[in-house]
Image (cartoon, coloured by chain):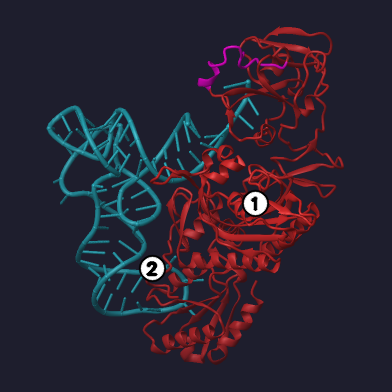
Chain colours: A red, B cyan
RNA sequence: CGGGGUGUAGCGCAGCCAGGUUAGCGCGCCUGCUUUGGGAGCAGGAGGUCGCCGGUUCGAAUCCGGCCACCCCGACCA
């Protein structure tokens, strides 16, 4: 591949909208270009790097016994309606109609499509287990695409689906996929931390996320410092380090609190801590108000609330919605005597005594409130978010919060799709039973961005060898010198014979520009052919990762480069 | 969806508040000469519906309205 001919359109300056290293460098190094918000085109080098990541994924999936398929990107609505996700998905699903008015969506994932295929094949226990995967472009109309490839709307993902006759066999496959993912991350030079995760819209009983620790990660992770507990904050369990305070034990009392709608104001006015106040956050779900009660010093975790409500179709009550519910004393809503409104209570509110809450009457709060005596905390659910200082629910150790990039997620689905889509198998006795399923995703375009995020310096990308778009760049300094050009072409051909692709910088530019572009593009080895060829018959080779340079005799250069590559990170 | 910001040459930006010749700068691009081991020099040159539509005005990149696109923050404390 030649550097000229707009093959590698590098940019000297940082694109105005790039916020992260991977976003900036993938564009500046001429690997990709934006097409629309959260949608990117891959240029030759970017497409090569993506292919290398995807080939590692393919390799490990095949090694684990999975079979590759190619499913459609445009999905008919029928199976999605059958599974219930046509309704559950909300605006994140990109929907459209064809000329006949039939409804379709751009596949955000493919459980429905694959499960209906298996269902129609009416397998017997002899046909199972099976694990089918594809590596393909997905579309999710994200609320806010961010950080280039990191959170795109259109993105590349490997998605795999396994089908089993028993829970035990699903467990075995789950472990096999876990192992495959560990290998994939390792081969791509990514450190991972595996945590328990929410199953969200995919559903299922158990799931693990593969996280790459990073400050730009969008997920908050919780790890116990004493045991092996690790979880995504969106579903973690914790034990509070403190008990909700007893600010005013005793009888119920109404207090005039004019205009005090925040926890801070109320706690301040009552001369007590926020740990003594019950916080109420109002949501609207399916046109119905939902009052969520949590300890005053905590926030509502919307991901946990979504698990409880069984949908993510809810939002905090907006100003314009408040007037629709005249019975709600917004700002002063409390659990005592609150009728006709759906409620959710955080587990921490069970059995509290002597606490403060809204009086369901404007400008009034109640003090001395006691659960059971004054209200019943039902339904009870863990809907509050974790905080620094909370304790591990398993061992009581200190919990540590950090950030991570989710590159993979594996799920035990159970019967979530096989039942509604009627995917059954006949067992030994001829009885029909629903197939037990698992699903396993890994974001290949996100992994590409993550690799750049983890492997770069001020000058540019430092591709680990396994995912580098090409292993070697050859730079000729004297583009007018026939000997140098001839040597470069010969070396390129020799390396090609050894299966090593070359990016050949054939441009007639100042050396500095070519060196800087080579560092920016970041191929593992740079071979520089210049005047030393004529003076002492050598070419220089620089290892991008270490910055180390050495001179090789031109005759043995191809051998030495092959050897140097074996040693490169 | 709410709030904020931006949109001027391929990229990065100035000009806009206080409307007034041919709309500027840096990088990149083209031609020629010189140069060539870490972003060269000189000379010449090309490239713009100033996001789109409408309005105000003798006159609009600049003021006003609408729309679109992109970016940031938020989606949460009632």
Residue B9 lies left or right of residue A25; in this view the side is left
Question: Which residue is under mark 2?
Answer: A6
In reply to whether residue A161 is colored magenta, the answer given is: no
Please report, as a chain letter, where disc 1 is located: A
Q: Which segment did they paint magenta? A: A319-335
* Nearer to us in this view, A81 or A548: A81
SS under mark 2: loop
Res. A349 image quadrant = top right
- Quadrant of the rendering where the C terminus of chain A is positioned: bottom right
| Nearest to the observer: residue A187 or residue A133 | A133
- Image position of A143 (left or right of A397): left
Q: What secondary structure is marked by label 1?
A: strand
Q: Is residue A203 above or below residue B37?
A: above
The image's mark for residue A406 is 1
Q: Quadrant of the N terminus of chain A?
A: bottom left
Would residue A151 be seen by someone viewing this image from the given angle?
yes
Residue A209 visible somewhere in the drawing? no
Question: Which residue is found at the position 57% from the left and 72% from the top?
Answer: A524
| Residue A501 x, y percent position in the rendering | 52, 78
Most extreme residue toward the right is A395
Q: Mark 2 and mark 1: span between their CA atoms?
A: 34 Å
């Amino acid at each position: 591949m030649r550097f000229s001919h707009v093959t590698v359109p590098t940019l000297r300056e940082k694109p105005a909208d790039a916020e992260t290293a991977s976003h900036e460098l993938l564009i500046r190094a001429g690997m990709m270009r934006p097409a629309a918000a959260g949608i990117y085109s891959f240029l030759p080098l970017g497409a090569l790097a993506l292919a290398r990541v995807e080939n590692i994924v393919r390799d490990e999936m095949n090694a684990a016994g999975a079979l590759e398929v190619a499913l459609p990107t445009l999905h008919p609505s029928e199976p999605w309606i059958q599974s219930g996700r046509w309704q559950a998905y909300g605006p994140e699903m990109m929907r459209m109609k064809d000329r006949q008015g039939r409804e379709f969506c751009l596949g955000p994932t493919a459980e429905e499509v694959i499960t209906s295929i298996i269902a129609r094949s009416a397998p017997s226990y002899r046909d199972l287990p099976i694990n089918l995967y594809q590596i393909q472009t997905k579309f999710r109309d994200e609320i806010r695409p961010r950080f280039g490839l990191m959170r795109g709307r259109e993105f590349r993902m490997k998605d795999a689906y396994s089908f089993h006759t028993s829970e035990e066999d699903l467990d075995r496959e789950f472990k096999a996929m876990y192992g495959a993912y560990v290998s994939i991350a390792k081969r791509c030079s990514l450190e991972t931390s595996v945590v328990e995760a929410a199953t969200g819209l995919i559903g299922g009983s158990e799931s693990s996320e593969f996280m790459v620790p990073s400050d730009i990660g969008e997920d908050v992770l919780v790890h116990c410092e004493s045991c092996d507990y690790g979880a995504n904050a969106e579903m973690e369990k914790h034990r509070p380090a403190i008990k909700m305070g007893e600010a005013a034990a005793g009888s119920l009392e109404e207090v005039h609190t004019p205009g005090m709608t925040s926890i801070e104001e109320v706690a301040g006015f009552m001369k007590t801590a926020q740990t003594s106040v019950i916080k109420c956050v109002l949501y609207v779900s399916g046109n119905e108000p939902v009052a969520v009660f949590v300890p005053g010093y905590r926030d509502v975790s919307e991901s946990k609330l979504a698990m409880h409500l069984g949908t993510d179709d809810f939002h905090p009550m907006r100003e314009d919605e408040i007037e629709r519910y005249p019975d709600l004393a917004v700002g002063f809503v409390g659990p005592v005597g609150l009728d006709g409104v759906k409620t959710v209570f955080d587990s921490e509110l069970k059995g509290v005594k002597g606490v403060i809450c809204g009086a369901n009457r404007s400008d009034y709060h109640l003090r001395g409130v006691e659960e059971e005596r004054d209200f019943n905390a039902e339904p009870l659910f863990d809907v509050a978010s974790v905080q620094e200082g909370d304790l591990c629910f398993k061992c009581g150790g200190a919990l540590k919060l950090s950030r991570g990039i989710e590159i993979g997620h594996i799920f035990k689905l159970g019967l979530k799709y096989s039942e509604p889509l009627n995917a059954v198998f006949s067992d030994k006795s001829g009885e029909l039973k629903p197939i037990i399923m698992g699903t396993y995703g890994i974001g290949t375009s996100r992994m590409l961005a993550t690799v750049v995020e983890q492997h770069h310096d001020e000058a540019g990308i430092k591709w680990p060898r396994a995912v580098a778009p090409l292993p070697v760049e050859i730079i000729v300094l004297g583009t007018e010198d026939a000997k140098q050009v001839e040597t470069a072409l010969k070396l390129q051909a020799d390396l090609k014979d050894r299966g090593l692709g070359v990016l050949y910088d054939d441009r007639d530019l100042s050396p500095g520009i070519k060196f800087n572009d080579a560092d920016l593009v970041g191929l593992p080895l740079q071979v520089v052919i210049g005047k030393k060829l004529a003076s002492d018959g050598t070419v220089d080779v620089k290892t991008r990762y270490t910055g180390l340079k050495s001179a090789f005799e031109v005759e043995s250069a191809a051998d030495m480069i092959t050897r140097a590559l074996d040693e490169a990170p």
